[in-house]
Image (cartoon, rainbow, N blue to C red):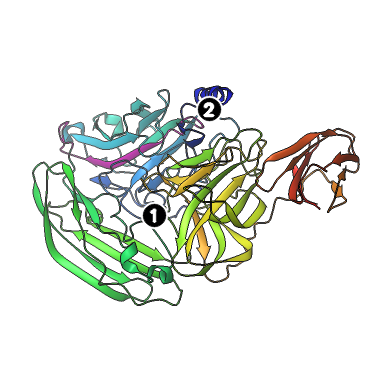
Amino acid sequence: MKSILRFLLIAAVISPWRINAQEYTAPLSRRSAAKAHTAARPTALSLPFFEDFTGYAVFPDPALWEDHSAYVSNTMPSASFSRGCATFDANNARNVPYDSMTAYHQVLADSLTTQAIDLSTYTPGDSLWLSFYYEPGGNGFPPKPEDSLMLYFLRNDGLWQQVWATGGDTANRFKNVMIPVKDTGWFHDQFRFRFINKATFGISNSEWNVDYILLDAHRNYADTLVRDIAFTANPSPLLGDFTAMPYVQFKTNPGTFLASNLSATLQHSGALPATVSYGYKAMELLTGTALGTAAGSSVLVPGANSLSFPLFNFSGFLPPASSGGKVVIQTQYYATGIYPNEPKDNDTIVQNQVFDNYFAYDDGSAEKSYFLHLYQSAPGAIAVEYALYAPDTLRGISIYFPRTVPTSEQKDFSLAVYRDIAVNGGTDDMVYREDFLNPVYQDTVNEFTTYTFSQPVPLPAGTFYISIIQSAGGYSDSLYIGLDVNRTGGNHRYFNIDGTWQPSLIDGALLLRPLVGKKLPPSGITPVPASGLSWTVTPNPANHQIQLSAPGEQDLLHYQINDMQGRQLQSGKITNRAYIDISSLRPGMYFIRMSARGHQWTTRKLIKQ
């Protein structure tokens, strides 16, 4: 009953997050943003102004936009009109929350401002309208009702005038907005418009998606359709289960890994059904080897709707086996537009299938964060199942850690490799463990941190598990890991918070990738350093008792002794140079954690003989 009550209390406190047993998803502090591309300020733009964010850059096109705190996302919208949208959240362009100290604080957050648009030759009689679509939440977390998305116009007197705003909701679908441009103060050669969101970090992250922006003359309130044929999200991947894997592993049996049903989706924004021609061309990108082309297929796409259609079988177009190097199969899908002057960029979509030195279930982009809430006296662990199809050597792990408020930089964790875990009739069989690691945050979008193992781990063909182990006592509780929510079903993930492995019930793939093959360069990531408190444990190895000494410390010392799985076996408060009885411990390796007032916890290994 206590555990049930504890869960209910937790659920009541953090109900805005998605909850399932003791595993959770949370808003994503996501944009550790790459440096924005810069360009000379262009001359004033002319009408029509159109933007659907269909490119492949991290930030909006600087030829159209003068700031970059909002970013371009291809996976955050739940159902986009064309590939990409502008996403607004609670974090700045360097992935740092606008308020990095106070959770649940509401701030003015991202903005997206156009370059100057010359409206000086127009009058209210030209019937200018600005239209766009917006979506609260999408694949992220919806904004709170008191959060908002706002639109401002720049007047000829230099003042910004709010012309539209909406509060947060959970509708999770795109809505159309039509704004008439009729105030005489807006008709000047430096006109701009700007989107701004008001966000609360820590509850929802206040994510908004904006797409299909059109400003043009001779429109009316009912002119909501941008007549266009466009590819929407990326086509389904070439592989079925994995999204990436080493080519030497793939070539053991390509038919096992290739997806059986490849498909893409076209969005038709016209009013009437239309027949659209489409085709593709494929090549091995690094060598330029042509792999195949097809043209002349067609599909009938309904008006004001989207349609998924099958693509092509790649089994006959694979490049020869590699010696272990990188292989990239690039496929360009294209459709033939049917409307005069319709946008052309979104008629083509490019997909790269990467074969490199890692396995991945994720698509490289996180929409949420995944974490475990641990019991105070018990460790927790996440394990993700992978498989080798030929013997190989495991060299390290790449992980994407989203930021949190307050920061998780001092939360230590362990990485472990299992040949088997105690689930579905198996038993725990750990073959490698690396301890005292910290999460590291990068300054580029969805950039992984690589943890190179101190020792290579040779593995035979067969199943293995990568595990992140979090110690008891709250020292690594709620460690956020990026979650790709576009991966549904078959996530190969298990969690353990009470000594028992359970299958994860939260859809999505962790941004966690095992690295195999040739030796990796050093990652530069070292175990948790001893900071602040200097202390020793003697003797070590020991039989019956040990002495803990912290020179110069006058306060009581707090200590814990944990086993290899992170379970707390002994704890208490002692004076400096006190002795601790360890005769009840079985022979083996343990970890001692020590702290004093004003100092962080530090850890030492202890060998019990």
Estimate the spatial distance between the alpha carbons at disc 1 and disc 2, rounded to whole Å.
Answer: 31 Å
Would residue 188 be visible to someone looking at this image? yes
Q: Residue at image x 17%, y 40%? A: 225
Check disc 2 and report its element: helix, strand or loop.
Answer: loop
Q: Residues within 10 Å of mark 1 (few under 14, many from 20)?
A: some
Counting residues from the N terminus, which is met first, the one under dot 1 or under dot 2? 1
Is the residue 280 above or below the residue 271 in the image?
A: below
Task: Judge left or right: residue 594 versus residue 487.
Answer: right
Give the labeled residue for mark 1. Answer: 57
Q: Is residue 211 part of the magenta span, yes or no?
A: yes
Magenta-colored span: 201-224
**Residue 204 image point, x, y percent:** 45, 31
SS of the residue under disc 1: loop
Determine whether, in the image, residue 566 is placed left or right of residue 458: right
Helix, strand or loop: magenta stretch: loop
What percent of the width, then of the height, locates residue 547? Answer: 88, 44
281 relative to 606, above or below? below
State left or right for residue 253 relative to residue 435. Answer: left
Q: Position of residue 153 (x, y in %)?
A: 34, 33
**Mark number, residue 104:** 2
Residue 539's disc is: none
Q: Which quadrant of the rendered structure holds the N terminus?
A: top right
Name which residue type carries label 2: Tyr
Q: Based on the displayed image, in which of its 4 quarters is residue 315 positioned?
A: bottom left
